[in-house]
Image (cartoon, rainbow, N blue to C red):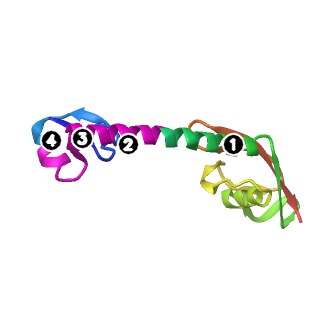
Amino acid sequence: MKVILLSDVKGLGKAGETKEVKNGFGFNYLLPEGLADLATPGILKQAQRFIAKRKEEASTNLEAVKSKADAVKGKTVTIKTKAENGKLFGSVGQAEIAGALEAQGMKVDAKDILIEKSFKEVGTFPVEADFGHGVKASFDVVIAAE
């Protein structure tokens, strides 16, 4: 039986792909769960349009991600916080770094910032941001005492 996947199915394929599956799997699981539809000529045309649209969106998204990474790459972000003898009262984590980047006009999600653990002392630290699609950017975070 030939079906078109309406959503991603683990171990089978991604939405919009045409797959050949066993009748039982198609009729008993994929079709009733709304995960696939029979591959008729009309549905095949819809799937081709869907795939083309998805590729276009992916390329547009990749350009946006690259521009975000270029804006951050090589920059230095300074965060001032309370400290005594080089030790911070608290810590500086992903959210604080994202906030400091945003204050400088660079919008980066906190989840995109890669650090092993929060910083607990003053100094300069190299940080990397992973924007997905294999695009990464490195920048420095300077933590200074107030």
Q: Is residue 54 magenta?
A: yes
The mark found on residue 16 in the picture is none
Task: Measure how far apart labels 1 and 4 are at the Cα level.
Answer: 44 Å
The mark found on residue 42 in the picture is 3
Q: Earlier in the sequence, mark 1 or mark 2?
A: 2
Q: Nearer the viewer, residue 83 or 18?
A: 18
Q: Amino acid at mark 2?
A: Phe
Q: Position of residue 19 (x, y in %)?
A: 24, 34
Residue 11 appears in the picture as rendered? no
Q: CB atoms at circles 1 and 2 under 8 Å apart?
A: no
Q: Position of residue 54 (x, y in %)?
A: 44, 42
Q: Which dot, 3 or 4, sits closer to the camera?
A: 3
In the picture of the structure, the residue carrying the numbered disc 4 is 25
Task: Measure how far apart labels 1 and 2 are at the Cα level.
Answer: 26 Å
Q: Which residues are magenta?
A: 27-55
Number of numbered discs on residues: 4
Q: Which dot, 1 or 2, sits closer to the camera?
A: 2
Q: Is residue 74 magenta?
A: no
Q: Earlier in the sequence, mark 1 or mark 3?
A: 3
**10 Å neighbourhood of mark 2: few (<14), some, or many (≥20)?**
some
